[in-house]
Image: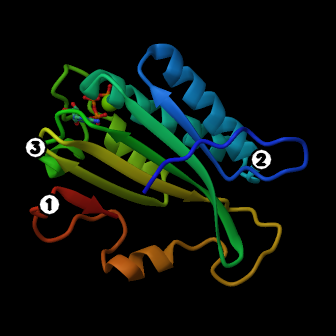
Amino acid sequence: MPLNTKTWPAEGSRVEQVRIPVASDRDILRARQRGRELASEANFTTLESTSIATTVSELARNILQYAGRGEIMLRSIQQENRTGIMVVARDDGPGISDLKRALKDGVSTSGGLGLGLPGVRRMMDEFEIVSRQNLGTTVIVKKWARRCTTAGPGSTSNASFEKRDGLPEGRFGAAPPATGRVVG
Ligand SMILES: Nc1ncnc2c1ncn2[C@@H]1O[C@H](COP(=O)(O)OP(=O)(O)OP(=O)(O)O)[C@@H](O)[C@H]1O
Ligand SMILES: [Mg+2]
């Protein structure tokens, strides 16, 4: 999927997508700020916007720390009556050899706290990570706004994602997938 850059919205227009290259600490800050802006415009509460901004900076920091460079893509998403944000963090770095382990609290190969990925997973409604050794890592997360201007059935639920993938929330599949992919 090509990650096209679109300019930040002009007055009155709707944000579709923004792409932020990540290769420095400054880029992490920029990505975090953009995440917060987009979240505010998408009707998220201040607390939810902070979760999104933190998610963006954790994923961007991992890109910088483990892959050296990569990109963050932020996109407004809509489904039925609900609106949300999708964050894609992508790099062509070394990949993660044991995804199941990397998603556990306190596991770090760099002497960090090892709370980045599991924390992101807890803060977001949907979480997917695909990683291949020496080919890179892609993390895709979504968060749906709890307060809706057009309230309706399913407006605050993440049931469709769980149904599609057949995985209960917050649990891994039975065995680590051979492709290095974890969803849910
Ligand atoms: N983009 C990536 N490329 C390669 N390895 C990664 C990437 N992101 C995470 N990892 C691996 O997954 C581990 C867990 O990541 P996580 O963000 O949870 O913790 P951390 O970065 O070690 O510490 P913290 O984020 O708490 O400072 C990392 O230690 C690293 O080995
Ligand atoms: Mg980290």
Q: Which residue is mark 2?
A: 41
In the foreground, 106 or 166:
166
Q: Which residue is mark 3?
A: 97
In the foreground, 90 or 124:
90
Q: For ligand 1, which image quadrant applies?
A: top left
Left or right of 8, for residue 63: left
Instruction: Please tell me how crowded label 1 is: few (under 14), some (14-19), or many (20+) other residues with Cα within 10 Å.
Output: few
Of helix, strand and loop, which one carries label 1?
Answer: loop
- Three-letter amino acid code of the residue under disc 1: Thr
| Mark 1 vs mark 2: in front | 1
| Mark 1 vs mark 3: in front | 1
- Three-letter amino acid code of the residue under disc 2: Glu
Res 78 label: none
The answer to which quarter of the image holds residue 102 is top left
Residue 49 appears in the figure: yes
- For the residues labelled 1 and 3, say whether their Cβ atoms are less than 8 Å apart: no
Q: Which residue is mark 1?
A: 179
- For the residues labelled 1 and 2, say whether their Cβ atoms are less than 8 Å apart: no
Instruction: Please tell me how crowded label 3 is: few (under 14), some (14-19), or many (20+) other residues with Cα within 10 Å.
Output: few
Of labels 3 and 2, earlier in sequence is 2
Residue 113 appears in the figure: no
- Three-letter amino acid code of the residue under disc 3: Ser
